[in-house]
Image (cartoon, rainbow, N blue to C red):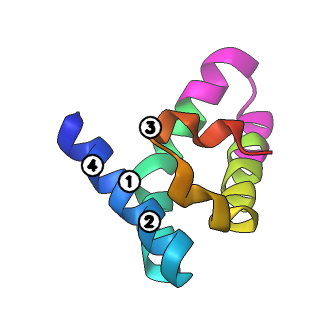
């Protein structure tokens, strides 16, 4: 888990500092399935879970300049 968190931080840093689209794609591929599964466990709707996760990734790209300040990848969902 620690190695994965370190890798996620590295991807977030690349996105924040270099607008790195390949890092964004890698982050998406790494997290999309798990986030959708988690959202589905709460929402009980595939469509709503997919929409929520899509919104999260849109927000990540829109707020990419704030990603560098994130200490823990789990706080990514608190971007305003």
Give how far across and how far down residue 16 sits, in percent. 55, 70
Contact (CB < 8 A) between labels 1 and 4? yes
> Quick check: can you spot residue 34?
no
- The residue wearing badge 4 is 6
Q: Nearer the viewer, residue 65 or 29?
A: 65
Contact (CB < 8 A) between labels 1 and 2? yes
Main SS of the magenta part reads helix
- The residue wearing badge 1 is 9
In magenta stretch: residue 66: no
Give how far across and how far down residue 19 sits, in percent. 56, 81
Q: Earlier in the sequence, mark 1 or mark 3?
A: 1
In magenta stretch: residue 44: yes
Q: With 54 as the anchor, is 1 left or right in this view? A: left
Question: What numbered label is drawn on residue 72?
Answer: 3
Assign the N terminus to one quadrant of the image.
top left
- How packed mark 2 is, by other alpha carbons closer than 10 Å (few <14, some 14-19, many 20 or more), is many
């Amino acid at each position: 888990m620690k190695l994965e968190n370190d890798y996620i931080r590295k991807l977030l840093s690349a996105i924040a500092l270099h607008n790195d689209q390949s890092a964004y794609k890698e982050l998406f591929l790494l997290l999309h399935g798990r986030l959708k599964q988690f959202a589905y466990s709460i929402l009980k709707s595939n469509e709503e879970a997919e929409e929520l996760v899509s919104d999260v990734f849109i927000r990540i790209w829109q707020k990419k300049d704030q990603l560098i300040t994130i200490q823990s990848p789990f706080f990514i969902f608190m971007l305003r």
